[in-house]
Amino acid sequence: MNKPERDSKGFKIYVESMAKSSEDKAERILSLLRTALENNPGDILDLGAGGGELTRAFLLMAEEFNLKVFALDKDRRMIKILKEKFEGQSKIKIVKADVKNFKLGKKFSAVVCSSILHEIFSERKNVEDVKLILKNIYEHLLPKGVLIIRDGLKPAPTDDIVFLQPLKPELFGRFQKILNHTKTSWLKIYAYHNPKKTKLLMALSRENVYELIVKYQYLEINWPVEMKEKFGFWTKEEARVMLEEIGFNVIHLKSYLLPYFAKMFSCDFRLFEWQDGPACLAEATSGRRRPGAIEIPYPDTHLVIVAKRGL
Ligand SMILES: C[S@@+](CC[C@H](N)C(=O)[O-])C[C@H]1O[C@@H](n2cnc3c(N)ncnc32)[C@H](O)[C@@H]1O
């Protein structure tokens, strides 16, 4: 299935949105990368380098350690940006290739996958595609080399029901519009309770709440691409199991709520769970009574993993 391509305006917005989170990405990844290079010096491979904001930070580290960064992306427009950004720099090699079948004929001390694996998963909604890439990455690592991943996180459990209460009237409309837009894919509205009351609550599976809240800020121009993607493609446990099956030793596995999301969420919505569990769903959907709801914290949105290859 071919992925729809962003037009030039949508592409510009996509690149800008990467830059928006690059500070957080750098903060989460750089210290892990530094430890990896100190223990086992060798070149760095940045898979799905995109607009190169994070690559720039890797390049500084490569210069410090006298190593090279290989920045790989399959998108010709990203490659153009990368070439312009890093023109004349000797410590970087830009590679146009598909992460699904790349073969670089050399091994790395560290491979970084920042916000790319969910895109791979989303193409066919098949976690085996992610596994194939991870296996190929394993083959590209030096003994004791590390894979560093920063990406989305599927909440667990995934299929129970959560209430979402928009705090601004226009957001209720926006959420509904997204739900309508995605009706054939991953989002489903089960019920919203009693529109005459000021508190409008939307009932959704926990997994769908997650997908909605990590995407509702996207501009509509990019909905045809972004809303088809599934950001939370694995739970913490699923990530660990898959990496260990391949032979990795998972040495770091931490989830967190992206700080700028936390700020935005607190202005925009609150989340609740049913006091007496999902058994209330039938009553809630029929609108007969307002179920007792307990406010719950916002979920973690991102996962950072360090997985080490053996000897
Ligand atoms: C969300 S961006 C992340 C960019 C950067 N790593 C960051 O974290 O800021 C995902 C990047 O992965 C690239 N990408 C997606 N699928 C790919 C594939 N199959 N092979 C190579 N690159 C791919 C996209 O072109 C895009 O530049």
Image (spheres, rainbow, N blue to C red):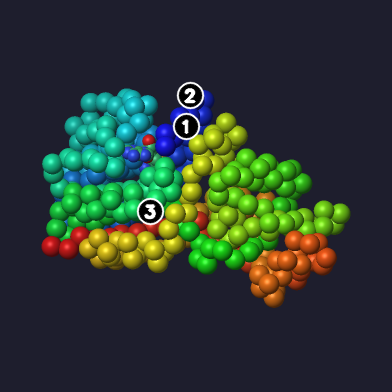
**161 lies above or below 2:** below
Q: Which residue is mark 2?
A: 8
In this orientation, does residue 182 appear? yes
58 vs 294: above or below: above
Is ligand 1 less than 8 Å from the beta carbon at label 3? no
Q: Amino acid at mark 1?
A: Pro
Number of residues whose C-alpha sits closer than 10 Å to that of mark 2, classed few (under 14), some (14–19) or many (20 or more): few
Label 1: state its secondary structure: loop
Residue at 38% from the left image edge and 45% from the top image edge:
120
Residue type at tag 3: Val
**Mark pair 1, 3: CA separation:** 20 Å
Q: Is residue 32 left or right of residue 174?
A: left
- Residue 43 place in picture, x, y as percent: 18, 46
**Dot 1 alpha-carbon crowd within 10 angstroms: few under 14, some 14 to 19, many 20 or more:** few
Residue 215 % position (x, y): 56, 45
Residue underneath mark 1: 4
- Say which of 217 and 57 sits in front: 217
- The kind of residue on which mark 2 rests is Ser
Q: Which mark is residue 127?
A: 3
Residue drawn at x 82%, y 67% as measured from the top left: 289
Which comes before the other along the chain, label 3 or label 2?
A: 2
Q: In the picture, which quadrant includes the N terminus? A: top left
